[in-house]
């Protein structure tokens, strides 16, 4: 009797399939709580692909898919003409939503039906929306109560409470595991800074990264009203990437700490400068990609946005040629490594020590202690003299002797200079030039051309100081007088007046004896 009564009701219900609007209206209207007639709703499916109970189940599943994905169908936008044609395919088709390109209606004769391709795809879509077989739960949960409170059934409210409690417990569990177990392991391994500054702030985002996908999968089970379901699922999908951004943002810090330790093991200082720059680039990349994911989950057309950014990027590139040039200049510096942080360089009118290499400019501390910022595009196009890469540091001077210095004394003095160079711990021993080199206007010049093997300018100055002191002491020991630009009037005929010229030792053996005595008594200090 009950089956006969239901059949009579079906016969009396009116429906129409003459336009896309009437077909969708028939499908959705007769699956509402106040007019639940799956047999009538199934009429919207092409009878060649599904009939009877199978068609009813597929019609129900299709509505569950739309509700579970929060897809709101605006009936006012659906065409109400039998002769409707899709403008792209030029066929009698109407595509219901962009989220499912294969979900469309097609005209068969004078009626519109859900297409065969749509009907065959419904089971697959349903399993994607309800991957845990939650369609069984849909039969269980309504049995928990049918009373409505605030527009929701009691079983829906119970389901919401269950999801809240489950989320809270999972959050506490993951936070406990990360903060107590993982952090303790890191502390035992000696990574206290990593644990305190990175892992602890990441603990909560990691737990939400797991919880939110579960909520996105389980919320459709509650079969909330379509408007509420649309906004709830949209909010969950939009918020979830935020925690992903926080997680990967912190993950960049972990990678940066690891790269910093690798950079500390190398002799180059450019990689020490590269790590902070790489960290900034990766963090910017994470934020940009995360922002695109959020916009995509909010159903913005990011394809058009990216296309617009491409066109805008071209205009921006034309307007920011210098900035782009400086950026590529920085890449050339990191690839070619013409200098590194701490090197003393000369480039154009700039002379100083490199303090920082950025993506736009290089910061150089001059010897006036001023700070100069040189665009990388400029510095890479100039000749760079890197004094910091020198193996040896040249020192050249002329030692001026007075014109009355005897030749033998000059020769012994030159030999003494050579011995000073040989005995100093920071001079190059395989190449130096020390010779009586010039007869100037007011002096006899000895060329003193040597090299220091020291890493820094300060040590070079210290070595110069030691060498020059030894030269002065040698000259004092041998009785050599240093000349300076003067004009001297010699009057030798005054009675009882001695001449101004000093009395030199003219015997070579005596001079060499003095040199040996000096070298034995004045050994240069060992500065190693």
Image (tube, rainbow, N blue to C red):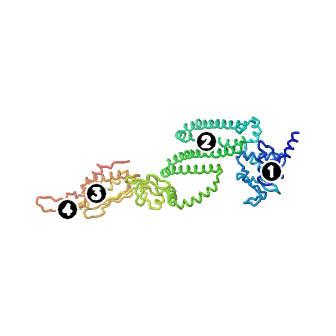
Q: CA distance from mark 1 to mark 3?
A: 115 Å
> Which residue lies at the image location 77% right of the left edge and 39% below the top edge?
139
Look at mark 4 in the image and give the residue it sits on.
488
Q: Earlier in the sequence, mark 1 or mark 4?
A: 1
Corner quadrant of residue 5: top right
508 up-or-down from 6: above or below: below
| Residue nearest the observer in this picture, 268 or 356 | 356
In front: label 4 or label 3 = 4
In front: label 3 or label 2 = 2
Q: Which mark is residue 105?
A: none
For residue 368, side relative to residue 336 (left or right): left
Asked whether the residues under the numbered discs 2 and 4 touch, taking CB atoms below 8 Å apart as contact, a structural biologist would say: no
Asked whether the residues under the numbered discs 2 and 1 touch, taking CB atoms below 8 Å apart as contact, a structural biologist would say: no
Where is residue 102? Give x, y as percent. Answer: 74, 53
Q: Earlier in the sequence, mark 2 or mark 4?
A: 2
Q: Earlier in the sequence, mark 1 or mark 3?
A: 1
| Label 2 CA crowd tier, 10 Å (few <14, some 14–19, many 20+) | many
Asked whether the residues under the numbered discs 4 and 3 touch, taking CB atoms below 8 Å apart as contact, a structural biologist would say: no
In front: label 2 or label 1 = 1
Q: CA distance from mark 4 to mark 3?
A: 24 Å
In front: label 2 or label 4 = 2
| Residue nearest the observer in this picture, 432 or 189 | 189
């Amino acid at each position: 009797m009950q089956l006969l009564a239901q059949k009579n009701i079906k016969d009396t219900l009116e429906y129409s399939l003459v336009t896309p609007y009437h077909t969708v209206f028939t499908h959705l209207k007769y699956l509402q709580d106040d007019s639940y007639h799956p047999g009538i709703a199934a009429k919207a499916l092409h009878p060649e692909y599904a009939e009877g109970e199978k068609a009813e189940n597929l019609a129900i599943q299709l509505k569950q898919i739309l509700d579970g994905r929060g897809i709101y169908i605006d009936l006012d936008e659906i065409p109400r003409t039998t002769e409707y044609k899709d403008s792209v395919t030029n066929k009698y088709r109407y595509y219901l939503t962009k989220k499912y390109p294969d979900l469309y209606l097609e005209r068969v004769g004078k009626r519109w039906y859900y297409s065969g391709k749509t009907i065959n795809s419904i089971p697959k879509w349903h399993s994607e929306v309800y991957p845990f077989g939650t369609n069984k739960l849909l039969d269980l949960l309504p049995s928990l109560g049918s009373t409505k409170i605030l527009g929701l059934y009691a079983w829906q409210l119970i389901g919401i409470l269950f999801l809240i409690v489950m989320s809270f417990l999972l959050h506490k569990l993951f936070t406990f595991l990360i903060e107590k177990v993982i952090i303790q392991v890191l502390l035992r391994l000696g990574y206290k800074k990593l644990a305190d500054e990175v892992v602890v702030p990441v603990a909560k985002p990691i737990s939400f990264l797991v919880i939110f996908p579960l909520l996105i999968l389980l919320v459709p089970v509650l079969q909330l009203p379509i408007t509420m379901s649309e906004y709830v699922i949209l909010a969950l999908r939009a918020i979830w990437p935020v925690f992903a951004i926080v997680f990967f943002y912190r993950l960049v810090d972990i990678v940066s700490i690891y790269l910093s330790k690798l950079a500390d093991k190398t002799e180059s200082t450019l990689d020490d400068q590269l790590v902070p720059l790489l960290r900034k680039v990766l963090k910017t990349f994470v934020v940009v990609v995360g922002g695109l994911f959020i916009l995509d989950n909010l159903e913005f057309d990011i394809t058009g946005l990216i296309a617009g950014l491409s066109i805008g990027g071209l205009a921006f590139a034309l307007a920011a040629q210098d900035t782009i040039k400086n950026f590529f200049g920085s890449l050339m510096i990191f690839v070619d490594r013409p200098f590194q942080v701490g090197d003393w360089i000369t480039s154009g009118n700039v002379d100083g020590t490199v303090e920082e290499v950025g993506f736009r400019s290089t910061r150089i501390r001059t010897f006036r202690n001023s700070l100069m910022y040189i665009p990388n595009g400029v510095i890479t196009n100039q000749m760079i003299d890197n004094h910091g890469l020198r193996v040896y540091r040249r020192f050249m001077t002329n030692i001026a002797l007075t014109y009355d210095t005897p030749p033998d004394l000059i020769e012994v003095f030159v030999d003494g200079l050579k011995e000073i160079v040989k005995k100093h711990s920071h001079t190059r021993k395989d190449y130096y030039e020390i010779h009586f080199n010039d007869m100037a206007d007011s002096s006899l010049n000895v060329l003193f051309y040597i090299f220091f093997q020291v890493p820094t300018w300060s040590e070079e100055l210290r070595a110069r100081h030691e060498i020059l002191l030894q030269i002065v002491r040698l000259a004092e020991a041998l009785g050599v007088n240093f000349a300076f630009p003067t004009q001297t009037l010699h009057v030798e005929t005054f009675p009882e007046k001695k001449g101004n010229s000093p009395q030199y030792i003219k015997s070579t053996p005596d001079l060499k004896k003095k040199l040996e005595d000096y070298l034995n008594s004045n050994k240069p200090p060992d500065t190693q």
